[in-house]
Image (cartoon, rainbow, N blue to C red):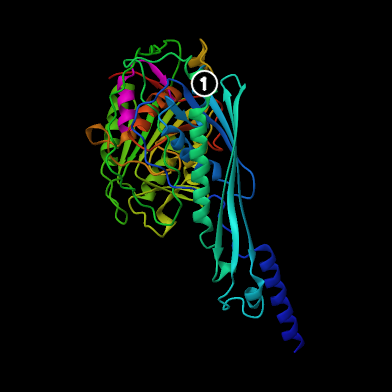
Amino acid sequence: MKILYRTHRVIMGLFILTTLFGCATANLTSLPMMPPQSKLQPKTAMDLFVDSITYQGLVPGDATARTEPILMRYLYNKNYFNTVMGSENSSEVSPESLRIKVVVRPKEDHTYDWLITWPAVYPMPLYWPFQSKKGFVSVDLQCELLDNKGSLVSRYELSHREDYATKFYGFFRTGDAEAKLVTCYESVFASLADKIVSDKKVAALASRVPKMTASAAPPKKMPVKPAKEPRPKPVVVKKEEPVKEEPEMVAAVATETPVPRNVDFGKYYALIIGINDYKHLPKLKTAVNDARTMAEVLEKNYGFSTKVLINPNRTDIISYLSHLRQTMTNKDNLLIYYAGHGWFDKQAEEGYWLPVDATQDNEANWVSNATITSNIKALSAKHVMVIADSCYSGSLTRGLHITQKSSDYLSRMAKKTTRVVLSSGGLEPVEDSGGESNHSIFASAVISTLKENHGVMDGNELFSKIKRPVMVNSDQMPEYGDIRKTGHDGGDFLFVFSQK
């Protein structure tokens, strides 16, 4: 009896604590869907950058990454600014641009109707149906609008609140709280966009920016879709064909860097992987063609020795990486190109490449970022670059600080250890087609840029040239950065034109 009595007291105490702290709380980052993309032309030549988004409160760690592209799309759809870009593009800020810094405070609170709810505490916590509660959700948003010198232009404070109620199993359900949160976010995002474009101070600044002619004006840069919620099945996201915009007109062509004779660039090797014919996953259309064309361009234009793996399994990929570890020297350069399925496990915070024998529910044949990273770290090669054209490929990167090019830039870059990755997207799904000559949009941009180069082009220059056409023709945001924990020492990968 004493044991039973004590057990009852423990159970009762646990459910009282559960009740006091709330058994079910709404996800405070229940964000709205990405709004449809506007195709209208901008009214001004001024650029806008989302400098930072800060959440205050207990929210998931990826809230900022998911919020930024959605807020960018709301601002973009006002058709006011020439470009609307994210924090990773801060190096491209023009003298006439504006920045915004945003602080978001989501909140949820609720109370119970104890007259009918108390049996749910004890003794019928799971079975008592009348666990009535009511509450509210709200989103407060503060925004500072700054000019390019950091001076305050305007400050905005916005708030939206929605009430909600749950009559059945209130302890274990949030009712429509999360749907109401979506409404709150939609309201403050839309209101912020309205306030910025209707601000007289912004209009005065915009009037000072020279209008670009049709021949010189670049197309608008478009924000991308947020990363989709995981799990657990890797899929190819089928999308409608992208709407074609007017051809980009460039006012002037950048001067290419000539190949210096006094710099030893070393030997160049490439591992090219393309997978179309998946055994257990949806087949792809363009990955193999992308891989073969990439190998051809690297061999013909840059003198690479290439190894092409078509539809390899996990063993094929790991075995060749092991071979490279044994054969490469500290004077060599290695490029690894991957076109195939990718997946990001949000719970484990781990990205994967999916070989031809990968299955949906078993990770045994997947190639993790950790495996790729450890192999790259162990390579003796001086420069290593990964180009990944797959979903969620941005999980390999972190931010890369790009230094200004001095007269001895190429000589310094050729000597420094480099471990970098160029990915077709961040944590969003990417297009499997849509580019020219049966290529993906990303692969088409990379291949075209490599073909057009006749000097020395570093990885950052390649990234800057392919980013705009990829963003214009898709919902992807390419990324470029150093590979985490692999010994990157501030160098950059160099593509040296050497036509055979």
Q: Which residue is mark 1?
A: 415
Q: Amino acid at mark 1?
A: Lys
Question: From what the image shows, is residue 66 above or below residue 332?
Answer: below
SS assignment for the magenta stretch, majority:
helix
Image spot of residue 290 (x, y percent) = 29, 36
In the image, farthest residue toward the right = 2
Q: Secondary structure at mark 1?
A: helix
Whether residue 89 is visible, yes or no, is: no
User: Around disc 1, counting alpha carbons within 10 Å, would you say few (fewer than 14), some (14 to 19), or many (20 or more)?
Assistant: some
> In the image shown, does 175 or 50 lie closer to the viewer?
175
| Region of the chain picked out in magenta, as a range | 443-459
In the image, farthest residue toward the bottom = 1
Q: Magenta includes 453?
A: yes
Q: Is residue 307 left or right of residue 484?
A: left
Q: Is residue 367 left or right of residue 8?
A: left
Whether residue 357 is visible, yes or no, is: yes
Image spot of residue 289 (x, y percent) = 25, 37
